[in-house]
Amino acid sequence: MFNAIMWVLTLVLCSSSATYFYAEKSLPDTSALRKEYPVVVYDKKAKTRKVIFKKRRPANWYRIKNVSKHVLNAIIVSEDWSFYSHSGYDVVQIKEALKEIFKGERVRGASTITQQVAKNIFLSNERTLWRKFRELILAIKLERDLRKDKILETYINVAAFGPDLYGISRASQHYFKTSPSRLNPKEAAFLAMLLPSPARYAESYHNRELTPFAKTIIKSILKKMVQANMLTNKESKRALQASLSFEASFKEPDNSTSE
């Protein structure tokens, strides 16, 4: 119910041009992301995170062109299906989320990838109306200042995939001991599944076995990728049948040849 009220009040605030322009002027300059790279640093003692900006591209910053298309596709269908067509926020998804919330159903949220970039880089995680409003305005500014690919690239490099685990480079190495360019469809779906709540959904990794919830979400993400023509039915079925490298049942493929 809290989320529903937040969305309703945020949209009401946005309808006020005076409030909108006041908020916009007080927000950071998002165009800085054209030339600078945000890096998330986690303080284990204080249990807080901060973002620092670097003028040179960090070694573990992955260009979008060097990331497996399966990762990008899995994240888009999971987090923000209309990413390449909206202007920072998705009215349809907001309406759907409100319906589900009022029905008492659990939802993954209605924030777009652009809104998540705004929050992860410029804002805190406090659950207040003012923060949500500023997030929405920042998302609109980001869409004006950056190309879609740049926004998506920034997202995958600052998103949390676990406690003190930020960015697709560290995530792919941590969970699968590989680079982002080599991730397969099921690995990509697993990482996309983590995004709403990495600490909670990483249980499968720690137990070396996918939970029923993880299996359901991964299957759903792969199905969406098929619906979006990002995978074929055959590729999806093959992915579902394969084990992830951290699972106890995983076996290295036999590359030996018979004499």
Image: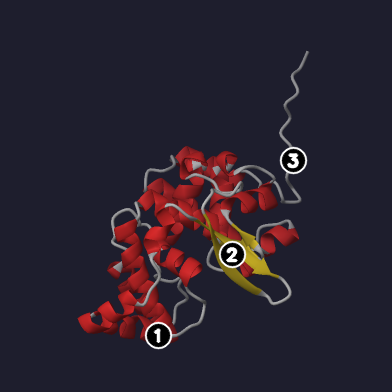
Find disc 2 in the rendering and name its residue: 213
Could you tell me which secondary element the residue under label 3 belongs to? loop
Q: Badge 2: few (under 14), some or many (20 or more) residues near its Cα, within 10 Å?
A: few
Note whether residue 46 is visible: yes
Number of numbered discs on residues:
3
Single out the mark in the foreground, 1 or 2. 1
Find disc 3 in the rendering and name its residue: 251
The amino acid on which the numbered mark 1 sits, given as a three-letter code, is: Leu
Is 109 situated above or below 114?
A: below
Q: Badge 3: few (under 14), some or many (20 or more) residues near its Cα, within 10 Å?
A: few
- Residues under labels 3 and 2: Cα distance? 23 Å
Find disc 1 in the rendering and name its residue: 129
Which residue extends farthest right?
259
The amino acid on which the numbered mark 2 sits, given as a three-letter code, is: Phe
Q: Residue at x 66, y 58 (%)?
A: 210
- Residues under labels 3 and 1: Cα distance? 49 Å
In percent of width and height, residue 202 lies at: 65, 63
Q: Earlier in the sequence, mark 3 or mark 2?
A: 2
Q: Badge 1: few (under 14), some or many (20 or more) residues near its Cα, within 10 Å?
A: some
